Image (cartoon, rainbow, N blue to C red):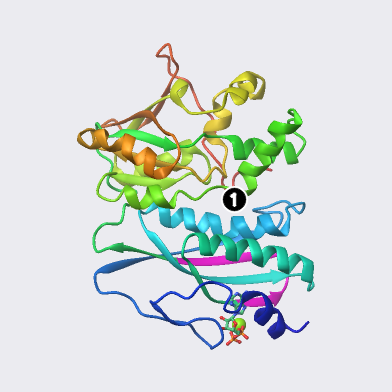
Amino acid sequence: MSEFSIINKYFTESTKARADIVLGIGDDCAIFRPCADFEYLISVDAFLEKVHFPSCTSPEDVGYKALAVSLSDVAAMGGDPIWVTMALAMPQQNEAWLAGFSQAFVELAEDYNVQLIGGDTTRGPLGVVVQIAGQVPVGRAITRCGASPGDIIYVTGVIGEAGLGLKIINNEVSVENEWSQALLRRLNRPEPRVRLGSALRGVASAAIDISDGLLQDLQHILDKSHVGAIIHVHQIPISIHYQNILDTLGGWQVPLSSGDDYELCFTIPPENQWEIESLAVKAGCALTRIGEITRERNLVCLSSEGQVLPMTKSGFDHFQTKN
Ligand code: ADP
Ligand code: MG
C-alpha cells in the first residue's frame, strides 16, 4: 500500500464533518473557520512507543489513548474539543495495525464531536503526535493560575490505578486476574473528563489533568497561582483493592506520584462548593475533596492523625525519572 492509499483508506472523511471545518483532509492544509465569540485552546502531545506506551500495547489502545490524552488537556482548560491533526510514524506498513489504530482513534473522535482534519504519515519509529484544538467562550478558559487561599481541592475518579497497570506490565506487581485486567484498562483507556471540564467553567478557579502524578501536577497549580496546599492523604480516592496493598507497595507516595490517570484536579472557591453534587452528576464520576489551598507556599501531606507525611517523589519527569 502506498502512503496515499493508506491516508485514503484509514484517515479520509472518517470523522463526521463539523460546520466550522471548511475543508478537511486532502489538501495542503485544512481550513477552519473560527467564531468571533470564542477563544481557541491549542495543544500538541507526542505518544511514542517505549516512551509513552510499551510495545505490547494493542493498536486499538494506541489509537484510543493518543487522542484521549489530548482531549484531557482540553477538558483541563474547560474547553469543548473541535478538531485534531495527527502525525503518525510506523516502521513498516501493517494493515491490521492501521485498521485497529484508526478505528479506535476515529470512534473516540466521533464520541466527542471532534473532526480529524489533517496529518502526516511517515515511516519511522512507532509513534503518534496529536494536535488538538478546543474552544471556550471569550475569557472563560480555566487556567492553572486562579487558585486562592481557602479554595477547596478536588479530584475526579480514582487515583493511581493507571500507574499500577504499568507496574503489572513491567512485572513489578502481580494481582488477581480480574483486577489486573481492570488496571490495564485504566492505563490504556483513560476516560477524558470533557463533560466535567466544560461544566467547571465559571465554577472552578484552577484546573489541571493528572498525567505525571497528582502531587507534581497539583504543584503546577500552586506555582502558577503563588499559593500552597494541604492534602489529607486518607481522603485521596483509591479503590478498596488498592488500599489493601498500599503498604506493601510503599504507602501513599505511590498513588500520589504515579502518572497516566488523566483525572482532573481542580480548585473551587468555597462559595461555589454547593455546585459540586450537580457537577458530579454531569461528570458521571465521583468528585472527591482532598484538601485546601493555603497562603503558605508549600505542599503539605497530612495523615489521618494530622501528622506531616514526607514525600520524596512527586511524579514522572522524562529527563529525571529512571525507568
Ligand atoms: P503534504 O505532502 O502536503 O504534507 P500529505 O501527502 O502528507 O500532504 O497528506 C495528504 C493529505 O492527507 C493532507 O491533507 C494531510 O493533512 C492528510 N493526512 C496525511 N496523513 C494523515 C493522517 N495520519 N491523519 C490524517 N490526515 C492525514
Ligand atoms: Mg505531509
Q: Quadrant of ligand 1?
A: bottom right
- What residue is pinned by disc 1? 318
Q: Is residue 270 above or below residue 20?
A: above
Q: Residue at x 66, y 37 (%)?
A: 182
Residue furthest to the bottom? 27
Left or right, 175 with respect to 116, comes to right
Q: Position of residue 289 (x, y in %)?
A: 37, 29
Q: Position of residue 130 (x, y in %)?
A: 55, 66
Q: Is residue 125 visible?
A: no
Q: Is residue 306 above or below residue 100?
A: above
Q: Amino acid at mark 1?
A: His
Left or right, 99 with respect to 40, comes to right
- The image quarter containing residue 90 is bottom right
- The image quarter containing residue 13 is bottom right
| In magenta segment, residue 124 | yes
Quadrant including the C terminus: top right
Q: Position of residue 227 (x, y in %)?
A: 29, 37
Q: Which of the pair 281/320 is nearer the observer? A: 281
| In magenta segment, residue 255 | no
- Report the span colored magenta: 120-132
